[in-house]
Amino acid sequence: MTITSGPVYNGMPASELGEQGWECPWSGPNGGQCVETKQLPDGSVAVRQSTDPAGPALIYTLQEITAFVAGVKRGLADHLMAG
């Protein structure tokens, strides 16, 4: 499956990754401010802001996403919720 005609890189326009396959696993009562993710053919994960679907995408390796999710589950990102 071809998702782009060029290389996949951090900050690339998310629209170049196609519209199929984006998921919003963390949606809630936040007025549509959601983070969307897309698993890429090489196993990496693209992340974009739902309110700017053509804006920049951050690209993470599977190992980076795995470490991030494990850290969140252990409470290592709780400080980000402090107001």
Image: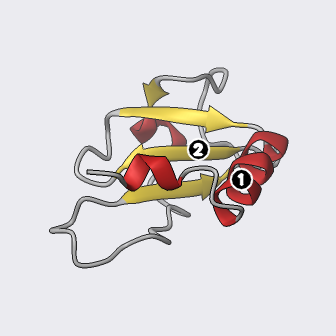
Q: Is residue 45 left or right of residue 78?
A: right
Q: Nearer the viewer, mark 1 or mark 2?
A: 1
User: Residue 67's spot in the image, x, y percent?
Assistant: 78, 47
33 vs 51, nearest the viewer: 33
**Contact, CB < 8 Å: mark 1 with mark 2?**
no
Q: Is residue 52 left or right of residue 14?
A: left
Q: Is residue 77 above or below residue 33?
A: above
As shown in the figure, which amino acid type bears the numbered disc 1? Gly
Crowd band around label 2 with a 10 angstrom C-alpha radius: few (<14), some (14–19), many (20+)? many
The residue that appears at 43% across and 47% down in the rendered structure is 80
Question: Which of disc 2 and disc 1 is earlier in sequence?
Answer: 2
User: Residue 16's spot in the image, x, y percent?
Assistant: 47, 35
- Residue 26 lies in quadrant: bottom left
Q: Which residue is mark 2?
A: 46
Q: Is residue 6 above or below residue 62?
A: above
Q: Secondary structure at mark 1?
A: helix
Q: Is residue 64 above or below residue 77?
A: above
The residue that appears at 50% across and 67% down in the rendered structure is 23
As shown in the figure, which amino acid type bears the numbered disc 2? Ala
**The disc label shown at residue 9, or none:** none
Label 1 and label 2: CA atoms lie apart by 19 Å
Q: Secondary structure at mark 2?
A: strand
55 vs 72, nearest the viewer: 72
The residue that appears at 71% across and 53% down in the rendered structure is 71
Q: Which residue is mark 1?
A: 71
